[in-house]
Image (cartoon, helix red, strand yellow):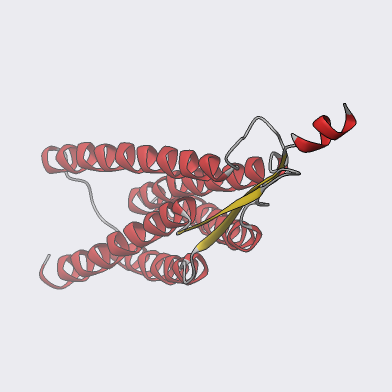
Amino acid sequence: MNSQTSEYRHSHVFDEGNPLAERKTRWALGLTLVMMVAEIFGGWLSNSMALLADGWHMSSHALALGLSVVAYRAARQLANDGRFAFGTWKIEILGGYSSAIVLLGIAGLMLFQSVERLFSPSPIHYDEAIAIAVIGLAVNLACAWLLKDDHAHHHDHHHGHAHEGHGHDHHHHDLNLRSAYLHVMADAATSVLAIIALIGGKLWG
């Protein structure tokens, strides 16, 4: 009986998530939150709607990065949970998917605000807006550097049996990290366009 039990013994060894990517995402989240507070507070002090809008836009990216951090934490805490028969990397993919949905919502909101601004133009504080856009671009580039995924994420999934053994190794790019990276790159591109538009508006009004 013991020999039969031993013969059909089945074990799982799961990956432990992506600790390096989790740390990088936490750093990017921290930088984004600091910049968000600075933009909102600066906009309130200067009575600049442009700065306030940019700050709230930054908050949406902070939310997306927060979702990525939550996904990493869940993957790490549930790494040895037998209910995840093929590892916890699916949680990271779900986090990336949720982050992409948030980005889609942001795009829709920005489109709505742009159309609204066409029909109800308001004075723009060019100097403050340009300064905050340049700082925001620097922060986004720093976050993009942190979140750049240079290596594939390695996942192990081993099944062990007394009479035979087999293992599966999975290599794929971290989609959760990729999603966070795309968020900050999209924000960086927005900052570049904003800087060009603001400089043009200031020079040729």
For the view shown, which residue lies furthest in the top direction? 1
Instruction: Please tell me whether residue 134 is drawn above or below residue 106 in the rendered image.
Output: below
Where does the image place residue 152, in percent across and percent down from the top left?
Answer: 48, 65
* Residue drawn at the location 12% of the way across and 43% of the way down: 118
Where does the image place residue 111, in percent across and percent down from the top left?
Answer: 20, 41
* Residue drawn at the location 63% of the way across and 52% of the way down: 17
Where does the image place residue 25, in percent across and percent down from the top left?
Answer: 57, 57
User: The C terminus lies in which quarter of the figure?
Assistant: bottom left
- Residue sitting nearer the eye, 2 or 160: 2
Instruction: Tell me if 22 is positioned left or right of 151 in this view.
Output: right
* Residue drawn at the location 43% of the way across and 37% of the way down: 98
- Residue sitting nearer the eye, 128 or 155: 155
- Residue sitting nearer the eye, 196 or 92: 92
Picture quarter containing residue 120? top left
Picture quarter containing residue 137? bottom left
Instruction: Please tell me whether residue 69 is drawn above or below residue 146 in the rendered image.
Output: above
Task: State the count of labels.
Answer: 0
Picture quarter containing residue 30? bottom right
Instruction: Tell me if 34 is positioned left or right of 127 in this view.
Output: right
User: The N terminus lies in which quarter of the figure?
Assistant: top right
Instruction: Please tell me whether residue 153 is drawn above or below residue 89 in the rendered image.
Output: below
Where does the image place residue 10, in percent across and percent down from the top left?
Answer: 73, 37
- Residue sitting nearer the eye, 39 or 19: 19
For the view shown, which residue lies furthest in the right direction? 2
